[in-house]
Amino acid sequence: MALSFPQIDPVLIEIGPVAIRWYALAYITGLVLGWRYMIWLAKQAGSFVKAIDADDFLTWATFAVILGGRLGYVIFYKPEFYLANPGEIIKTWQGGMSFHGGLVGVMIAAVWFTRLRKIQFLAFMDLASAVAPIGLFFGRMANFINAELWGRTTDVAWGIVFPGGGPYPRHPSQIYEALLEGLLMLVVLHLVWRRESLRSKPGVITGVFLIGYALSRMFVELFRQPDAHLGYLVGGTTMGQWLSVPMILIGLLMIKYAHKKAKA
């Protein structure tokens, strides 16, 4: 048994040479909704960040996500290909974005932004981390629409035969990631944010996000088909799992640091 892949055109609107793709729309939607949610959180009692600062960070975040995500994909996943074809790097509309690269990009932008505004870095990162799952949800749904990053072959009733994925049904791993990294993490981080005892310790929410995302990603990688040019790594692991390990360690250290600083 298998489900047929819904015939969704990756291009939403095309007028002459101008094409609006679902992939681009997903990024725009995630950034805009995350921006509005971040402003709302900044206005709540106990926030260390002003709403005007959360508002102004949208432009920084947009460039950081796109540049960091693309460069991360180029460096972590297909360095040989892009070294031989540097002109392909700018073709982001064809897909090929790395969350880990986007995360590094946002963190670098946040360091620069908070220094200019004289804002506490960890407090600002807590706010950014709380809204990040919104972008992750829409990004993964765009991966599904593009019929990319599909899962491994399966016999579960909800398996889908993806275009280009062969004749056998596969796990819709993009949906798994959208639900775990997106919706579930959004709820978890909101609940953590509501607890004043945790919100008052800058770094805790960021640590929870890093650990939660890493665990979700490592779990979904068990069902996701590895990139063809990378395949399985040591012991049947994947690149996504290896890139998630440092996130868990950094997340644990951040939570420990936040509690230690609060006690001091």
Image: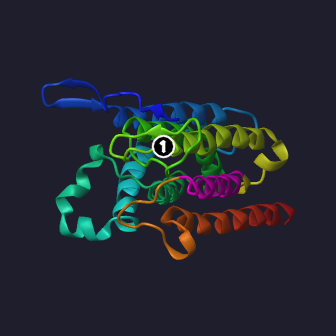
- Which residue is depicted at the point 24% across and 52% down? 90
Question: Is residue 210 a member of the stretch shown in magenta?
Answer: yes
| Residue 161 at x, y percent in the picture | 43, 39
Range of magenta residues:
205-223
- Which residue is depicted at the point 67% across and 58% down? 211
Residue toward you, 124 or 198? 198
| Residue 212 at x, y percent in the picture | 67, 53
- Of all residues, the one furthest to the front in this rendering is 1
Quarter that holds the C terminus: bottom right
- Is 242 above or below relative to 22? below
Question: Is residue 43 a member of the stretch shown in magenta?
Answer: no
- Which residue is depicted at the point 75% across and 61% down? 255
Residue indicated by mark 1: 57
Residue toward you, 81 or 26? 81
Magenta segment main secondary structure:
helix
Residue 242 sits in quarter: bottom right
Q: Secondary structure at mark 1?
A: helix
- Of all residues, the one furthest to the bottom in this rendering is 234
| Residue 214 at x, y percent in the picture | 62, 58
- Of all residues, the one furthest to the left in this rendering is 16
Residue 38 sits in quarter: top right
Q: Is residue 246 left or right of residue 99?
A: right
- Is 241 above or below relative to 199? below
Q: Amino acid at mark 1?
A: Phe
- Is 258 above or below relative to 153? below
Residue 36 sits in quarter: top right
| Residue 131 at x, y percent in the picture | 59, 40
Q: Badge 1: how crowded within 10 Å, few (<14), some, or many (20+)?
A: some
Q: Is residue 70 left or right of residue 209?
A: left
Q: Tell me if I can see residue 53 in this picture.
A: no
